[in-house]
């Protein structure tokens, strides 16, 4: 699993939210730029990414899971809410 040592210390950041942000016990989001977030476990394991993109009706969020062993991503879905995109990464 890809691990980034510094990620566990960063807060969850949502669109329109300012630092210090909100922390979640099972996931952390790191905003990489205005339209991309890295989704990690608190220990730094990278789970995937959430991309924001604009369509005629408004903003959409695409959840992409990182498959480390296969060295690729799979699209898990597209959503109207970032909260719904985040739910794709929660353990069942």
Image (cartoon, helix red, strand yellow):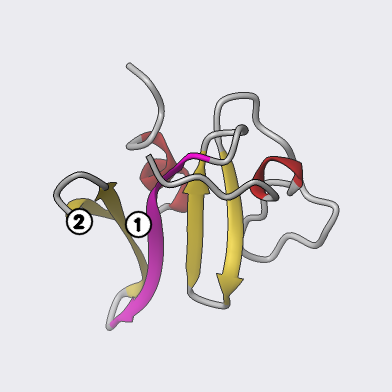
Q: Residue at x 39, y 35 (%)?
A: 87
Q: Position of residue 6 (x, y in %)?
A: 70, 50
Quarter assignment of residue 15:
bottom right
Q: Residue at x 68, y 40 (%)?
A: 8
Secondary structure at numbered mark 2: loop
73 in relation to 8, above or below: below
Task: From the viewer's perspective, tell me whether residue 37 is left or right of residue 55.
Answer: right
Q: Which residues are magenta?
A: 45-55
Q: Position of residue 40 (x, y in %)?
A: 51, 43
Q: Which residue is mark 1?
A: 80
Q: Are there few (<14), some (14-19), or many (20+) residues within 10 Å of tag 2? A: few
Q: Which residue is mark 2?
A: 71
Q: Nearer the viewer, residue 91 or 6?
A: 6
Quarter assignment of residue 60:
bottom left
Query: Marks 1 and 2, how far apart in space?
Result: 28 Å
Query: How would you classify the magenta stretch by its main secondary structure?
Result: strand
Q: Residue at x 14, y 49 (%)?
A: 70
Report the quarter where the C terminus lies: top left
Q: Position of residue 17 (x, y in %)?
A: 73, 60
Q: Residue furthest right?
A: 20
1 or 2: tag closer to the N-terminus: 2
Quarter assignment of residue 86:
top left
Residue 3 is inside the magenta segment: no
Res 89 label: none
1 in relation to 54, above or below: above
Q: Position of residue 20 (x, y in %)?
A: 85, 52
Report the quarter where the N terminus lies: top left
Task: From the viewer's perspective, tell me whether residue 22 is left or right of residue 84.
Answer: right
Q: Nearer the viewer, residue 29 or 45?
A: 45
Q: Nearer the viewer, residue 6 or 92?
A: 6
For marks 1 and 2, give the one nearer the viewer: 2
């Amino acid at each position: 699993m890809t691990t980034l040592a510094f990620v566990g210390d960063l807060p969850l950041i949502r669109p329109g939210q300012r630092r210090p942000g909100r922390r979640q016990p099972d996931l952390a989001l790191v905003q990489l730029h205005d339209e991309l977030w890295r989704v990690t476990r608190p220990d730094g394991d990278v789970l995937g990414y959430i991309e924001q993109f604009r369509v005629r009706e408004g903003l959409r969020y695409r959840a992409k899971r990182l498959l480390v062993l296969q060295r690729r991503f799979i699209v898990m879905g597209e959503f109207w809410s970032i909260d719904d995109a985040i739910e794709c990464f929660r353990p069942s």
